[in-house]
Amino acid sequence: MNNNTMPVPGDDRESRFKRLIDIGIALSAERDYNRLLENILVEAKNFCNADGGTLYLMLEDGKSLAFAIMRNDTLGVAMGGTTGKPIPFPPVRLYLDDGTPNQNNVSSLVALTGQTINIADAYESKDFDFSGTRKFDAGNNYRSKSFLTVPLKNRNNEVIGVLQLINARLDNGEVIDFSPDIVPLIEALASQAAVALDNRSLIDAQVKLFNSFIKVIATAIDAKSPYTGGHCLRVPELTKMLAKAACDETEGQYAGFNLSPDDWYELEVAAGLHDCGKVTTPEYIVDKATKLETIYNRIHEVRTRFEVLKRDAVIHYLEARIKGEKSDAELREDLDNELAQLDEDYAFVAECNVGGEFMAPEKVERLKKIGARTWVRSLDDELGQSIAELRRLPGDRPKPPVTEYLLADREEHKIPHEIVNQLAVGMEEFTLRRPDLHLNLGEIYNLSIARGTLTNEDRYHINDHIVQTILMLRALPFPKNLKRVPDLAGNHHEKMDGTGYPRSRLRDDMSVPERIMAIADIFEALTAADRPYKPPKTLSDSLKIMGFMCKDKHIDPDLFNLFLTSGVWKTYAEKFLKPEQLDEVDINKFLFKPPPPPPPPAVA
């Protein structure tokens, strides 16, 4: 046996093979990429008792090797990976400026050929340029001697990296050659490492692809409705903030709450997709800024009818003058009164359309009275309509000229929601669903909305987005660690008292992440400055409303208190709210204080 090579006694082979198997199992189980890289180098180094080593990874262009991990026991060097210390060396080029292969560097040649190179003494080597190694040694009072450089090949036999070990040692520290007997074992370890790296890269690529898919969905919603897209990006941020605050708790109800890496990713995915069902909701409902709005604001159509009535009034005035029915002064006074009344009535209808004030019963009665006025349509309104519109028209309609009401709720204003009705079959678990629901575009019906701009049918279809979210997410083949995504995403509109939707869950039926997402969704909606139908609320107003929601058992009071005391509300506000929304807040005014228990019954 050569005294300058590492001995491999026969009785040690079995333990080495077992160690190799254990290393392979450990590498395949490691999920953190940086720790995986470190483990590859450290295990290889320990396997042959090497003093140092470097792990290179092939760059995407396939033309350079980047330094990934460096270790040297004697010099106390630990760079790359989890150390956080960058490696200050440029990548090793595989090709020279003239395009020829770089065969002067041992690592580049191994990467190019895919063959292992074992060098007994770098200083004596005539095949490679070790001038850089000599310079490094001189500056660090070190002697690099034996080198074992092994390629890392994936399942496609492509070199994805290079493992280089330096200075094999005996137990007494003497530097020796890398024994030929150890080379196959290191090559086997390198092969296992390459498979583990390849698998980790593939998994990371799939995660990256899926995360990009989530962003694409948010972007699609954003393109359809800009404020909803912003909502889909902000709610995940706030969800993570509050979840971290819960994990950081050391006292109280959430002292033992924690999320594993899988739990965090599951919550992140669910939060990112929590409103993906909104891609099915018509934007003219989601963005309904006035009561008569559909794809366009129908107040323009109503205004035209008022214009027709005003022209009719002028025509009637002129005809009456010709006939001499009254004096010119009386006719003029009648015309002015009629025009003024029409102006006043239209202004009232237009005000109702905005939905800024509560529609008291007397206002609704006035609206109906105005709508009962008539005008004459002389053109055939069936001309130019789509097939779907014509199908909604009742039969035996009179031909023009036709006298019609100024405002009307007509049969053709009721539009069945075919998609919702089809999906309702077999979905009885969703208490929200009503298979016979339709869109009602009736003019009186919509203008009479008591508050806001949405009818009950509009609200149903907006709320239905959460059912569509669940259906869409259930259709995805989530892996085991993401199986709860549909429920996590689909329960953020549930309330603690069971009055939420779509499944009327109670507090105890909901997980902590689900309750967290419910709070995040509400706070974002209250403070959002990009809604077309409402001005942004201040911080104090938003927290006041959420305080009432706690009292009404709509949101989790313990989580809301944590939301306040942890300062999550403030951190989020400083990042996402407008300066004019950041008013003074005393959280003590909003902290939920449970009512005192009832006194014990009196003892007789």
Image (spheres, grey):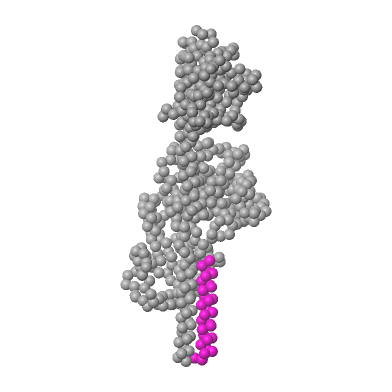
| Residue 307 image offset from top left, x and y in percent | 48, 76
Q: Does the magenta stretch include residue 374?
A: no
Is 534 located above or below residue 114 in the figure? below
Q: Which of 425 and 526 is in front in this view?
A: 526
Considering depth in this image, is 4 or 130 the residue closer to the camera? 130
Residue 328 is a magenta residue? yes
Residue beneath the point at 56% across and 56% down: 530
- Residue 26 in view, yes or no: no
Rendering coords of residue 193 (x, y %)? 48, 26
Main SS, magenta residues? helix
Q: Eyeballing the image, is 323 above or below 25? A: below
Region rendered in magenta: 325-354
Q: Which residue is drawn at 58% across and 41% down?
A: 244
Identify the residue at horizontal 54%, vertical 57% (top origin). Answer: 531
**Residue 447: % across, % down:** 49, 68
Judge whether residue 322 can be spotted in this image. Answer: yes
Please state which of residues 553 and 114 is positioned toward the viewer in this rendering: 114
